[in-house]
Structure formats: C-alpha cells, structure tokens
Amino acid sequence: MDRGLYRGRDLGGKRNTHLSGKRRDLGPVPTSPVRPIFGLTAELLLQPALVASFLQEVLRTCLEARPNPAHLALARWEREGRLGAVITQNIDTLHERAGSRELIKLHASIDRLRCTDCGFRQGFDEHQLRGWLAALTVSRQPRRQLWRALRQILTPCPYCGGRRRPEVVLFGDTLAAEAWQAAGRSASRCDLFLIIETSGLVYPAAHLPDLARKAGARLMEIGLHPSSYTPKWISTSREGQARSWTSWIASSVDPRSGRMENGAENGLDIGKAFV
C-alpha cells in the first residue's frame, strides 16, 4: 500500500502485494531464480550496522504509519463477505490495525521474534517496539556497543534459551511452509484475484497470480506502474494509488447484486469474486 513504508532491498525489503481469494496441497515452497547466499542471520554476523540501520528504518516507518483507505476497504470487504483473504508481503501491522482477519503474511511481521531453535514466536506491543527503536539508535557507535543494543532486543528464548531473530522473511531466508500453503489455497479458490501495487518480481509470491489464473480466476491489477504481469495475463489494469482505486471499486459495486454499476468493467461480478 502507498504508505511511504520502507521498500529498500539491501536486506531483502519487499514490496507489498494484496491478493484476494481462497486449493489443494501445493508441495514445497518454490525457490527464487536468483537466490542470495546470506540471510538475516549471516548479515547480523557480517554487517551488524547494516542490519541495525535496516531495522531502525523499518520500525520508524511502521510505527508512524496508519492504515489508509485501501487497508480499510479491504477489511470492510472481508466483513461483508466479498473478500476471501488478503495475501501480503508487507511486514507492518497496518492490515491488522485496519481490521483484516483473514490475513496471510508471506514475509511474517516486524513486531514478532522467532526462536531459531524451538520455533517459539512472541509478539510485542507498540511501547516495546519503540524501545527497540531507541536501542537501535546506535548505528554510528562502535561495533561492541552496537552488538550490545542488538542483544538487548534479541533476548534468549524464554522457553528453551535459544537464539531469537526478527520473524521477518528476507532474501536468503526460507518462506514459512504454512503461509505459502495458505496463500496457494486462497489463490486457487478465488474468482477474482486483485493485485495491488506489486512489481511481480519477488518469488515465490510472484507465482500466485499464475496459480489463480490457471484455476480460472480473473486478474485485476491496481498500481502506479505496470508490473511483470501486465502484458501477459491482466484482464483489467488501473493506474493509480491503491487508496483511490479501492474506493472507486467499492463505490461502484451494487451491494445487492454484487455487480459493477453503470456497466463498469463489463459487469465484473465483484460479489462472486470476493466470496
């Protein structure tokens, strides 16, 4: 969503994708055509200052951001029974704060730590996240002080004492099988697959529109720029910010019939699409 959130790729920061829908087992998570050697754990060892700077920027923007009309529209469609699920590569908590419940976060969330030994996950509130941000404001300090700040955040697992790391999935990390399976089921069961502001270049998420298309779904794209899907499969494409076009879609739908009013989009059955 167009919220000015961090989209850098130094450590695998991902652009967002919101894809509606609800299939059978998809097998193992497919790998990216080009896969970097190191993930976040290796980067912590090799470049702690870079990791601290990355986390600091992500935390600051996520704490300052608020759900926009697009986030709110998706949550409303879910409550109305029009939207099956939201699949996102974003690591912020804006969808949750907007009210979305059927939410599949492929790249997990910035507000959670995961134990690398036992897998225990723990979430943190805004006050604790601001404490993290304050601790990370040491990126210009000596390496030893920087490691001290990171240890303050990445405390041992309360269950097994193992090492913990941010749950976010970055380049070089393995996508959670549970999230990928859920995303595949949603994509393969929908009637309309809505693609909002994504490049279509980050794998394995970039496979999902093709799964939906092969299962018979219609694809609709909304974004400021064409994606890798635009020339191949997109049946309906709209240029603009998500906050504008989701409002347009919502205002164009007849709440009784579920169809676009005034013949818009050739009578696309939005009601069926988001069930």
Image (spheres, helix red, strand yellow):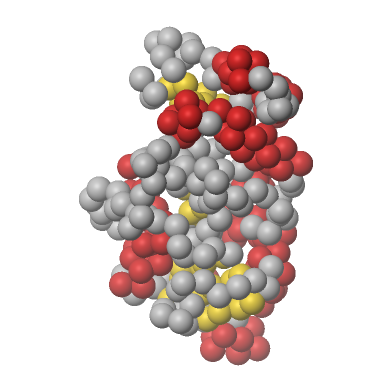
Does residue 160 appear left or right of residue 81 in this picture?
left
- The front one of 100 and 94 is 94
181 to 118, vertically: above or below: below
Q: Can residue 72 be seen?
A: no
* x 36%, y 62%: residue: 207
From this view, report whether residue 212 is shown above or below residue 182: below
Q: On the image, which quarter does residue 203 sit in?
A: bottom left
Q: Quadrant of the N terminus?
A: bottom right
Residue 68 spot, x, y in % from top left: 72, 55
User: Compared with residue 45, is residue 151 higher up or lower down, i.e. above or below?
Assistant: above
- Tell me which residue sits at (74%, 45%) in the image: 65
Image x and y of residue 221, in percent? 54, 73
Residue 150 visible, this angle: yes
Q: Residue at coordinates 52% horizontally, 65% vertically from top-left?
A: 199
| Residue found at the very far front of the displayed protein | 142
For the point 61% across and 15% down, which residue is it? 144
Looking at the image, is 9 positioned above or below residue 215?
Answer: above
Measured as percent of width and height from the top left, residue 246 is found at 65, 68
Task: Please state if 5 lies on the left or on the right of 155 as rendered.
Answer: right
The number of callouts visible is 0
Image coords of residue 73 (percent x, y):
66, 60
